[in-house]
Image: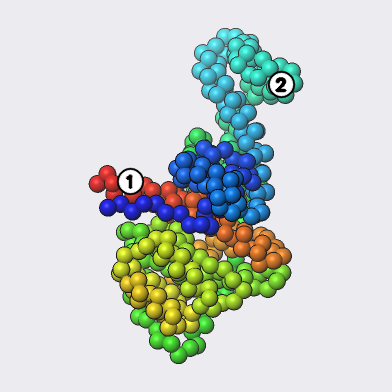
């Protein structure tokens, strides 16, 4: 029997914020989050009517504001693209004999389809721009159009995509282009990914608790969701001191299925993180739970939670961070793409920002090369559809 799709309380709150705070339509937000429109409608209605508590203040709305600014320009660019595509074949036939006069006739033929008849304040500078573009090689015109799409996608993906993942993002938006061409135009625009930095470990293995064997052994080859989970703790600096984050990552889908944040790096952080993951995913007994040798994961209460739900404990070799590479990779993405570019005055501010990054961007929008350049939630949906079809 297929398990019904479940959503965490944190994700529901962030999804409602996307509609209420950032002004997205229900259809657009549902598509962006890979959730049914009816489900999102129910969440928004519940928040508006007070059935559940409305979400708090916005976290990273400035990113969406930049996308909104580019959306208008992108819409005009699409209109120009359609006109130029239709005109190109005509130019090829007529240009030798009639020169530029055919270009003017094309503009006059399509002007009636442009707001304001293609003239005056309603169209802005569109006619002048069209005349200028028609006098340029088609390749150069398409490059300019693609630059606008690249700039919009660069902001939408939070300045984190290189040419390969950006190619998939542009294709989904209807802009097909080669990787090398995209890389060239990115250089022309001065577009760069946020730079990576190295991080230090936070594991404290100097304790007397028993340590589990390395059952996983770097076999990062899960074939089903909830087959292997990777867990770990990291830290974020704020004006109030360190904020610690415990996370649980599914090896197959790359989703963060559970997380918790707090001011102390104790079991009070790791237990809620794992409990949320278990409550949300309801894994079958036998799931491999892989962690480092930190005291939080070796303590009696934590081990009891694993045993109660039939989870198999596996721990990395001492001092070997590669044994837990999937969750280490997530920490790198979180810090390179978000944390290192922000200054958090309070822990609450950092929590809101990180929660939005995990629930909205990382799990449901960010493309992963390991998943065929799909977001984890989309990859998981496709996997469920394949199972139903089989």
Q: Is residue 128 above or below residue 176?
A: above
Q: Of residues 258 and 237, which is closer to you in this image?
A: 258
Q: Residue at x 68, y 68 (%)?
A: 238
Write down the residue under mark 2: 122
**Label 1: which secondary element:** helix
Q: Of residues 168 and 288, which is closer to you in this image?
A: 288
**Label 2: which secondary element:** helix
Query: Label 2: few (<14), some or many (≥20) within 10 Å?
Result: few
Report the coloring of the rendering: rainbow
The disc, 1 or 2, on the residue closer to the chain's N-terminal end is: 2
Q: Residue at x 47, y 44 (%)?
A: 39
Residue 2 position within the rendered picture, expressed as x and y whole percent measured from the top left: 30, 52
Q: Quadrant of residue 80?
A: top right
Residue 240 position within the rendered picture, expressed as x and y whole percent measured from the top left: 70, 71
Q: Residue at x 53, y 67 (%)?
A: 260
Residue 19 position within the rendered picture, expressed as x and y whole percent measured from the top left: 59, 44
Give the number of marks: 2
Q: CA distance from mark 1 to mark 2?
A: 46 Å
Q: Are marks 1 and 2 in contact (CB under 8 Å)?
A: no
Residue 129 position within the rendered picture, expressed as x and y whole percent measured from the top left: 69, 24
Q: Which dot marks residue 385? A: 1
In this rendering, position of residue 8 left or right of residue 342: left
Q: Residue at x 62, y 36 (%)?
A: 71
Name the residue at the left extreme.
390
Residue 22 seen from this side: yes
């Amino acid at each position: 029997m297929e398990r019904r799709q479940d959503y965490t309380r944190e994700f529901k709150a962030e999804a409602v914020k996307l509609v209420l705070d950032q002004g997205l339509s229900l259809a657009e937000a549902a598509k962006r989050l890979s959730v049914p429109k009816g489900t999102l409608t129910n969440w928004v209605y519940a928040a508006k009517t007070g059935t559940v508590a409305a979400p708090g203040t916005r976290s990273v709305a400035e990113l969406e504001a930049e996308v909104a600014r580019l959306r208008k320009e992108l819409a005009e660019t699409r209109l120009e693209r359609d006109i130029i595509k239709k005109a190109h074949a005509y130019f090829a036939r007529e240009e030798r004999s009639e020169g530029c006069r055919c270009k003017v006739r094309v503009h006059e033929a399509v002007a009636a389809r442009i707001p304001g008849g293609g003239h005056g304040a309603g169209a802005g500078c569109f006619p002048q721009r069209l005349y200028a573009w028609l006098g340029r090689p088609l390749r150069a015109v398409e490059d300019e159009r693609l630059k606008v799409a690249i700039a919009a996608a660069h902001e939408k993906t939070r300045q984190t995509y290189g040419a390969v993942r950006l190619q998939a993002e542009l294709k989904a938006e209807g802009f097909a282009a080669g990787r090398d061409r995209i890389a060239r135009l990115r250089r022309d625009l001065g577009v760069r990914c946020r730079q990576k930095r190295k991080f230090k470990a936070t594991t404290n293995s100097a304790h007397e608790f028993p340590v589990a064997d390395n059952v996983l052994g770097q076999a990062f080859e899960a074939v089903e969701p909830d087959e292997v989970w990777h867990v770990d703790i990291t830290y974020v600096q704020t004006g109030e001191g360190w904020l610690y984050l415990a996370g649980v990552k599914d090896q197959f889908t790359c989703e963060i299925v559970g997380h918790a944040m707090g001011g102390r790096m104790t079991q009070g952080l790791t237990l809620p993180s794992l409990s949320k993951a278990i409550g949300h995913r309801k894994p079958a007994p036998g799931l491999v739970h892989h962690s480092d040798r930190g005291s939080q994961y070796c303590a009696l209460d934590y081990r009891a939670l694993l045993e109660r739900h039939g989870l198999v404990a596996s721990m990395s070799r001492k001092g070997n961070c590669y044994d837990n590479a999937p969750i280490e990779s997530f920490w790198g993405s979180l810090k390179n793409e978000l944390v290192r570019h922000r200054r958090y005055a309070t822990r609450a501010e950092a929590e809101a920002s990180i929660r939005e990054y995990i629930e909205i961007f990382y799990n449901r929008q960010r493309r992963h090369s390991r998943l065929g350049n799909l977001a984890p939630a989309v990859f998981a949906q496709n996997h469920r559809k394949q199972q139903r079809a089989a």
